[in-house]
Image (tube, grey):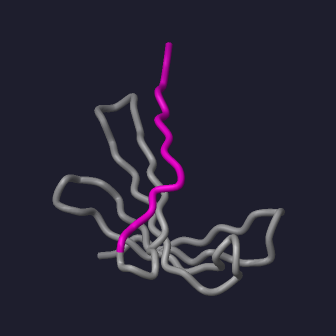
Amino acid sequence: KAFVGTWSGSMMEHMWVYIGQLDGEGRLVLDSEGPDVETGASRRYQDIYGFEGSDTRTIMSQVLQDDGTWNVFMRGRYRRVG
C-alpha cells in the first residue's frame, strides 16, 4: 500500500527513489533522500501532490532543515484547459 518510483535528471548524477502514500487529505506524499544543493550532504525531501477536482493538480517540494522544520522551495499548479 505504497507508491514507489524513481527519477533522475540530466543535470545531476543522483537517482531519486521515492516512497510515499496518500495522506488524510487525499494528497500523495512522496519521501526521498538526496544531496543538499549547497553542501552535497544527504537531506530528506518531500514532494506533495494535491488533486483539486479532475482538472487541477498541485505540487509542493520541500527539504528538511537541520532544525527539524521543512523549507518549501517549489510550488506549482497545473490546470487542464479545453
x%, y% of residue 68?
A: 36, 79
Height in image: 49 above or below 38?
above
Q: Is residue 75 left or right of residue 54?
A: right
Query: Farthest bottom residue?
Result: 41
Which residue is situated farthest in the top direction here? 82
Dominant SS of magenta comes to: strand
- Outermost residue, front direction? 67
Name the spot of residue 76 as percent of width and height, x first.
50, 40
Say left or right for 9 vs 61: right
Bounds of the magenta segment: 69-82
Q: Residue at x 23, y 53 (%)?
A: 26
Q: How many marks?
A: 0
Residue drawn at the location 54% of the way across and 81% of the way down: 43
| Residue 56 quadrant | top left
Residues 81 and 70: in front is 70
Where, quadrant-wise, is the N terminus in this rendering? Answer: bottom left
The image position of residue 28, as x and y in percent, is 35, 59
Asked whether residue 71 is drawn in magenta, I would say: yes
Magenta span contains residue 79: yes
Query: x, y percentage for residue 78?
Result: 49, 33
Asked where in the image residue 46 lies, by quadrant, the reply is: bottom left
Residue at the spot 68% in from the left edge and 70% down from the top edge: 37
For image coordinates 64% across by 76% down, the residue present is 36
Q: Nearer the viewer, residue 3 or 24?
A: 24
